[in-house]
Structures are given as structure tokens and as C-alpha cells.
Image (cartoon, rainbow, N blue to C red):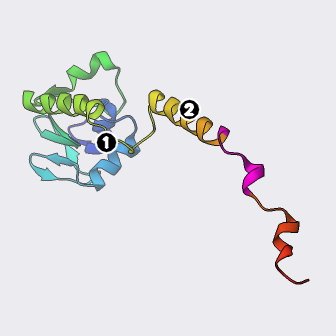
Amino acid sequence: MAQEERVDKWLWATRIFKTRSIATDACKKGRIAVDGVTVKPSRTVKIGDKISVRKPPVTYTFEVIGLTEARVGAKLVPNFLKNLTTRDQYELLDMVRISGFVNRQKGLGRPTKKEGRELAQFTEMSFSEFDFDDDFLDDDDIYDNDER
């Protein structure tokens, strides 16, 4: 068994990120820190290292308690890491989830079903009351005042 493992590979293997390329990108963007230092994807981790993973708005903290090169099943993840994320980070995540649904500004994002129905009703009413035939001049009316 190896004494060290690449940080991007370990993050993927322990299911913190869905793909290794996403883990690599997170490292390149400066969202991964080992023992408080921002790291590149090739940085190796060893047992006892503390890894901070910033997935806005939350910063997760893990301690490495095991190394693996292969992706492990969800039930085996606790054998390789210890979750040290503080309770206030999870509360922050809950607040963002709640406020995301309640405080959506009008006009931003995709319309809700209710807004879609109101929009459809509005467009049907406005065009059904509009008479296209009366509002446009005939070709004969245009040329009456002009000399041909």
C-alpha cells in the first residue's frame, strides 16, 4: 500500500468529487488546501493531512485516515477520511438552500409554472383583442396622396 497519494486522485477516490477532472479543476482554481496551503493537483497527501475543500458557499474539512488509488464504494468512504466540517458550515448550507427558493428575484431565472400560465394568459388576451385588419392601410390608401 502506498504511503502517499495525489490529492486529486484521493478526492475522486473518496467520492468528494464525481470525476477526477472536476477534482483537478478544483485544485487549479485554488479551492483545495492541504494543511492550510493551497495545492496543485499533483501534490501528494499522506495519512494525517487535513484537506479543506471549498465548494461555495461551504468549506468542507477532512482528515486523511487512509489512502486508496481506486474509487471506493460509498459505504467504505469512512475508512479513508474523517469529516471535520464544523456545524456552522452545514447551517450555512441549509440557509442558502432555504433562501434560494424563497428570495428568488422576479425576472431572474426560468419562470415558475404560475408565471408561465400568467404569461400565456396575458399574451392570449392581448392578441385576441387586436384586430389586424382595421389597423393597416390598404395599398390604394397609400398611393391616394402620392402621384404615381
Horizontal and vertical percent for residue 37? 12, 52
Q: How crowded is mark 2: few (under 14 residues within 10 Å), some or many (20 or more)?
A: few
Compared across the picture, whether 31 is left or right of 126 comes to left
Residue 92 visible:
yes
- Decide whether residue 134 is among the magenta residues: yes
Determine the image quadrant of residue 58: top left
Type of secondary structure dominating the magenta stretch: helix
Between residue 58 and residue 67, name the one nearer to us. Answer: 58
User: Dividing the image into 4 quarters, which one contains the N terminus?
Assistant: top left
What is the span of residues highlighted in magenta in the rendered image? 128-135
Residue type at mark 2: give it: Gln
Q: In which quarter of the image is residue 21?
A: top left
Is residue 1 visible to the viewer in this orientation of the structure?
no
The residue to which callout 2 is attached is 121
Outermost residue on the front side: it is: 145
Would you say 85 lies left or right of 122 here? left
The x and y percentages for residue 111 are: 45, 36
Is 71 placed left or right of 103 in the picture?
A: right
Q: Distance between the residues labelled 1 and 2?
A: 22 Å
**Identity of the residue drawn at 16% across and 41% down:** 52
> Is residue 38 in the magenta section?
no
* Other-residue count near label 1 (Cα within 10 Å), few / some / many at <14 / 14–19 / ≥20: few
Sequence-earlier tag: 1 or 2: 1
- Name the spot of residue 62 as percent of width and height, x first: 15, 33
Q: In this view, does 29 lie above or below 95?
A: below
User: Of all residues shown, which one is farthest toward the bottom?
Assistant: 147
Q: Please, what secondary structure does the residue beneath circle 1 have?
A: loop
Q: Along the horizontal axis of the image, is 127 left or right of 141?
A: left
The disc placed on residue 105 is 1
